[in-house]
Image (cartoon, helix red, strand yellow):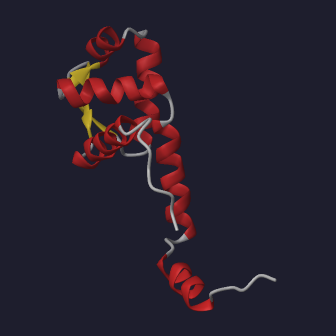
Amino acid sequence: MRVVDRARVTMVAAAMPEAEAVEELAQVFGLLADAGRLRVITALLEGGEMCVCDIAAACGHSESAVSHALRLLRAHRVVRVRRSGRMAYYRLDDSHVRMLLDLALVHIGHKGETDEPRR
C-alpha cells in the first residue's frame, strides 16, 4: 500500500514554477539540445559579438544554417542583434547563457564518477 507524504507533496507543489514558465524553460533547453546551435553559442561565448560569416567560419557550418540557428536563438532571447548598415552582429543576450553552459560542462565532466546511492 502506498502512503503519500502529504506535507512534502504540498511543499513541492507550492515550489513548482508556473506551467507557462516550465514551457518556456523546455523551449530554451530544446534550443540548447542541438549540437549546431551549441556551436554557435560557443562561438559567441568565445568570440563576443560576431557577424554571421565569422560565426559560420568558426563553426564550420554554412551561413544559411547559422542564420537559421540565430533566428531561433534570437526568438527565445538567447542572442541579440546589432545592425550596422547592411551587417548584423550577434552576441549573447546576457551572462545567464554562459552560466548554463559552464554548469553543463562541469556536469558532463563528472561523467564516469560514481555517486553515493541516494536515500
Visible in this render: residue 89? no
Q: Residue 36: percent from the left, percent from the top?
A: 45, 22
Q: Quadrant of residue 66?
A: top left
Count of marks, rendered view: 0
Name the one closer to the observer, 81 or 61.
Answer: 61
Q: Residue at x 49, y 71 (%)?
A: 17
Q: Is residue 44 above or below residue 75?
A: above
Q: In what quadrant of the picture does the N terminus appear?
A: bottom right
Instruction: Look at 77% across and 82% down and name the residue there.
Output: 2
Question: In front: 11, or 56?
Answer: 11
Residue at 49% over, 63% down = 21
Q: Can residue 114 be seen in the rendering of this structure?
A: yes
Q: Which one is nearer the viewer's eye here, 74 or 30?
A: 30
Judge from the rendering whether residue 117 lies leftward or rightward of residue 90; answer left or right.
right
Percent across and percent down for residue 54 are 26, 13
Q: Where is residue 52 shown, x and y percent of the image?
A: 31, 18
Residue 55 % position (x, y): 30, 17
Q: Is residue 88 left or right of residue 40?
A: left
Q: Is residue 82 above or below residue 52?
A: below
Q: Is residue 21 above or below residue 80?
A: below
Taking the spot 27% from the left edge, 43% from the top edge, the residue there is 93
Image quadrant assignment for residue 46: top left
**Furthest-bottom residue in this view:** 7
